[in-house]
Amino acid sequence: MRKIYSFYNQSVRGDTYRGGGNDKKSLTPAPWSVSSQTNLLPKLKFNSPLIMDVMMPWFVSPRTKPFKPFFSLLILFSLLYFKASATDIYVSINGSDINSGTKEKPLATLHSAIRKARELRRLNDESIKGGIRIIIGKGFYQLHEPIVFRPEDSGTKDSPTEILANGKVVLSGGVKIKGWKKLNGAVNGLPKEALGKVWVTAIPNFDGSDLQFRQLWVNGNKAIRAKNYNGDEMGRILSWDREKQTCKIPLQKGINLANIKGMEMLVHQWWAIANLRVKSVTIAGDAAELSFMQPESRIQSEHPWPAPWISDKTGNSAFYLSNSIRFLNQPGEWFEDLQNHKLYYWPKASEDMLSAEVIAPALENLVKIEGTIDQPISFVSFKGISFEHATWLRPSKQGHVPHQAGMYMLDAYKLDKAGTPDKPTLENQAWVGRPAAAVEVSYANNTSFQSCHFIHLASTGLDYKKGTTDNEIKGNLFKDIGGSAILIGTFSDEAVEVHLPYNPSDKREISANNTIENNLITDVTNEDWGAVGIGAGYVHGIKILHNEISDVSYSGISMGWGWTQTKNAMANNTIRGNKIHHYGKHMYDVAGIYTLSAQPGSFITENVVDSIYKARYAHLPDHWFYLYTDEGSSYFTIKDNWTPAEKYLQNANGPGNVWENNGPKVADHIKQNAGLEKPFQYLLKEKANSSQISINQAVNQSVVFELVFKPDNLPGNNALKTFAKENNLLPGSIYKWNNRLVIYTSSLKVESLQQTLKRLNATEIKLYDNLFYDFNREKNCGDKPVAEWDNIILSANLVKDEKMQKEYLDYHKTQFEKWPEISKGFCNAEFQRLAIFKNDRQLMLVISIPKGKKLDDLNPKTVENNPKVEEWNAIMKKYQEGIEGTKPDEVWVFFKPIE
């Protein structure tokens, strides 16, 4: 008991916790310590009255005497004794794998520690009843092969295996590169401006040959692989020839495209990029025609989505070339010359190459947790470990042409005849692979990563694949990652076409009941711009809670796969309380939160999505959204999400979605509570500095939709109310007259409604977005508008005479100047707004009045002591006539709101 007490008392009273005062909240965990980062006492909850009563004497001061009854101390000590019965295995940077693994004689590698733990479990050693803790001392541990956990390494609920950091522990898949010398003399192809400024060293040997890599970190900062356009600049392709599988680009002044061996092209296309290895360059005038290596050449030219963008209006697809010594022309760039076994780097002014730490990645996987469907791995946790410097070489060896969310295409093409049994209109087919991850987990349950760092990684950070259940990813930092921070769940097996619903007969395959909570994800997707912050495929019961995601090139959270309304493995998923900002840095068709396919019982609530970048080379500059339910999304509740405007997209959604109370009017406490919760906000000091790229502002204008139906085919009120809920519309925004419906809404909803309104089976859908007259009370009367309005909607036609139509429009164009009495009459009648929209010769008039008042009572006030209004009305009558379906003498008809 003394030994346990002194160990506990030291961990509480020593350097492991810091903070003054006698409030338990003032106790702040010190970073990179065993007791702070790994929670050595998980059974003790500090907010428990009994535990706090017993523990407070030691927390207050070393001099404070205990004052609670002795039986409370016995309870505490028994809890401590239970936890302390775990066996500890120590690893140290100065240890040896022939040692016993005690604190005094630590092992040198995690690999050996796992083997020792495995043997203890195999022998059912009495010492491990309380679990096994592998405690790794601070240091940089270079891995020469992935650390692999197998089913035999499983713990149990009462005897878990924990891998803990005692200090800052880095598990690195990288190689430190030394021997730098300043380059003397010229090198063939090196630009003149680089002469005398570039340093050189030999490429390190790895596995018997030169180490090939695509990333390089200098003093912890990612250097730039030499490219032909500097900074964020890119060129624009001239054309793409699908039959020849070639691309034409403009010749760049001062850039010689000779000696292209190893050169690559990155092309920006809609929501994904492609990395293509250049096979040949043919110069013709002021253009160069590029051909590419297989297999990426065929896939890139055959697949229809996403494809190179050709547009006179918004510009063709952007591109840059990389990996040639001819592009090494500014500080911070590097080039690996595999032919001559040399690595060149132009250091920044702040970097001293004689002392700089330069690291290149060598391993694709750092840790693999590999169970099987019948023998999953259980109860293994990592706490406080930093996973760094993983590579990914597929783009260098086979190219990289992603379909979506970083999943690369193995084969893809357009169908000659559209349609599949699940999707009659489907026009393309694709089969995809999954990018490598620094840490990969498959067939595992009750595993966790807590307070870990995933940084300086080429591809995905952490990937929970098939058969993963009841796992937790909590309180981690994901930063400087080339691909997605986190992937989870099945997307598509390589043998299965991506549009086929996934619902395996053996439900153990499904990724279920996992939690991703309170993680900081920042500066990820910085190489594969179409990857995402958090990507969830076919998942069931997932909880994505209180994460903060910033500085991503595409979407923050993407959940779902398959593009299908057919019910599948997905259900009961939750995205709640996340904060997503500064996203869409490069790619559009994008959202802070994006979904696919049917997911019954799923909720997207109380999130904050803000600040999307103005992507310079976006194919469609306005095609960005805060929330986006894409193809097949069904049975979602989207509620209480704060966004600066209601710029959302519902594309080809299925049934059962409910939108309620989203946008800038959501309660302040929801906005304040989103993102990292207080115990995890210490991570925010690691947040990447946001780019200087401008932020998009949604332009919100009023528009009117009109739907014309066949006689007696107008939808009923209940059907319209359901439609309103599914489309983020207020019921009061839908009006009807005769066989027509009118929806008065925001321009931000036009793209969604142009699709979803088709479900109502109208014979004609008309959009009125030409607002040619707009009386505004605040502007024209100098009064603040009332808080709540009722909108009165009327419609009429202009006469067919085009000359008279022009006269009508001219009158309204100059009315505020030449007929100021009209505005005065509107002000007197308490009109809040009077707007007139036009489509062809039909007009929509919207009069907004204080809620609860009647137009019949207010309208006469427009002419009180104001004969000019009567004169105006008399003139206007000759320009107007009734719409189809009106009575002979009827001109303006009133649309009534649905009840």
Image (tube, rainbow, N blue to C red):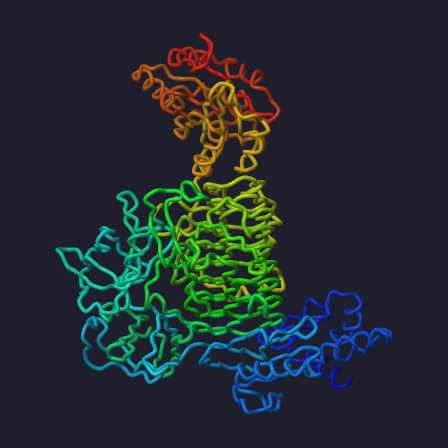
Image quadrant holding the C terminus, namely top right
Residue 819 at x, y = what percent? Answer: 40, 19
Q: Is residue 552 above or below residue 719?
A: below
Q: Is residue 346 above or below residue 711?
A: below
Q: Nearer the viewer, residue 226 or 764?
A: 764
Q: Nearer the viewer, residue 299 or 579?
A: 299
508 sits left or right of 740 in the view: right
Question: How many labels were placed on the picture?
Answer: 0
Which residue reaches farthest left? Answer: 285
Residue 245 at x, y = what percent? Answer: 24, 55
Residue 493 at x, y = what percent? Answer: 46, 59
Which residue reaches farthest top? Answer: 888
Image quadrant holding the N terminus, namely bottom right
Residue 272, can we see it? Answer: yes
Residue 384 at x, y = what percent? Answer: 57, 73
Residue 841 position by quadrant: top left
x 55%, y 52%: residue: 569
Q: Is residue 537 above or below residue 24?
A: above
577 sits left or right of 190 in the view: right
Q: Nearer the viewer, residue 845 or 204?
A: 204
399 sits left or right of 741 in the view: left
Q: Is residue 54 above or below residue 722?
A: below
Residue 898 position by quadrant: top right
